[in-house]
Image (tube, helix red, strand yellow):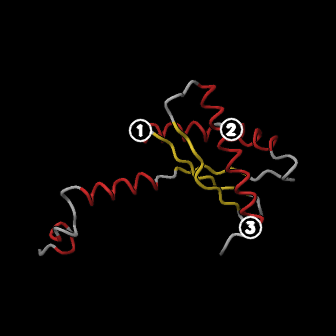
Amino acid sequence: MEETNRQKKIGGVLQKDLTDVIQEELRKAGENRVIVSVSKVRVTTDLSIAKAYISIFPNEKAKPILEELKTMKSQLKHQIALRTKNQLRKMPDLSLFLDDSLEHIDSIEKAVKGNSDPIKNPDLLDKRKKS
């Protein structure tokens, strides 16, 4: 089912505000060598839940930072609610997910550029191997 214009607008507002709040919190914590961006926010049709997909670089720090953000979820929600109080009646509940699509794209590029190119060497594919 396609998102309505209202869902897209709310998702965009939440995406911008969530990015600002997270970056502010990271600066307060002294994490200067970490880049965090909110790549997408999807809001349910009843506007009660917002699923935020977060990209974190470098990838080694992604899981610990995401877990820390999940523990701070109520604080993040409160700060975003203060920023959006004139735009939203009720702040949706936040669900945070790791967006690893860039890591996946990077692994595909490495596979294609490296020696393990299944196009050039079809024997690398498991289903092509004869048992």
Tell me the kind of residue under disc 3: Thr
Q: Looking at the picture, how far across and down is residue 8, in whole percent?
A: 71, 63
Residue assigned mark 3: 45
Residue assigned mark 2: 21
Q: Residues within 10 Å of mark 3 (few under 14, many from 20)?
A: some
CA gap, disc 3 and disc 1? 34 Å
Pick the residue in front: 41 or 119: 119
Q: Are marks 3 and 2 in contact (CB under 8 Å)?
A: no
User: Element type at marker 3?
Assistant: loop
Pick the residue in front: 90 or 30: 30
103 relative position to 96: left or right: left
> Of discs 2 and 1, which sits in the foreground?
2
Q: Which mark is residue 50?
A: none
Q: Earlier in the sequence, mark 3 or mark 1?
A: 3
Residue assigned mark 1: 60
User: Element type at marker 2?
Assistant: helix
